[in-house]
Image (cartoon, rainbow, N blue to C red):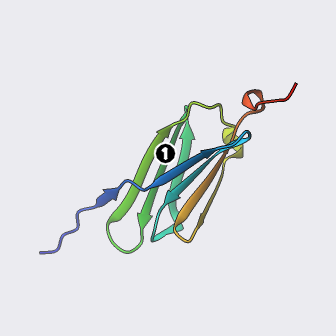
Amino acid sequence: ADDTRAVTLTPRVDILETDDELLVLLDLPGVAPDDVDVRFEDGELTVNGRRASGPVGYSRAFRVTERIAADKIVADLKHGVLTLHLPKVEAVKPRRI
């Protein structure tokens, strides 16, 4: 029997916060850069990725409470790890007085 059902996995993630940004690291082994969809809308970050070899995909969603400069988000996929830089807007960055 040929089993063609899709399997969706929840990838492991690390989230680090600095004064300037949130850094999100997701494990997406076997996913090519063209097969990743990252969206940030209404304070929700969603990541979907599809592996080229078979019906396995990854999906993860986060509610982001920090105010993020959505137009400055940068994504990079290397060696199966997706790195997302979510810069904070200037108003929420701490400042020294």
Pick the front one: 23 or 89: 23
Residue appearing at x 85%, y 29% in the figure: 96
Q: Residues within 10 Å of mark 1 (few under 14, many from 20)?
A: some
Asked where in the image residue 87 lies, by quadrant, the reply is top right
Extreme-front residue of the structure? 97
Q: Residue furthest top?
A: 97
Left or right: 82 as drawn, with respect to 30 = right
- The correct choice, above or below, for 26 with respect to 97 in the image is below
Tell me what residue is drawn at x 78 percent, y 32 percent.
Answer: 90
The quadrant in which residue 67 appears is: top right
* Identity of the residue drawn at 76% across and 27% down: 91
Nearest the viewer among 97 and 70 is: 97
Q: Which residue is mark 1?
A: 46
- Which residue is situated farthest in the left direction here? 1
Give the structural element (helix, strand or loop) at label 1: strand
Image location of residue 35, percent across then percent down = 49, 64
- Amino acid at pointer 1: Thr
What is the number of callouts on the image?
Answer: 1
Identify which residue is drawn at 60% across, 46% down. 16
From the viewer's perspective, tell me whether residue 7 is left or right of residue 59.
left
x and y percentages locating residue 89 in the rendered image: 73, 33
Residue 32, position as x, y percentages in the image: 51, 69
| Quarter of the figure with the C terminus | top right
Q: Is residue 22 above or below residue 55?
A: above
5 with respect to 30 (left or right): left
Q: Quadrant of the N terminus?
A: bottom left
Locate residue 23, reporting x and y percent: 62, 49
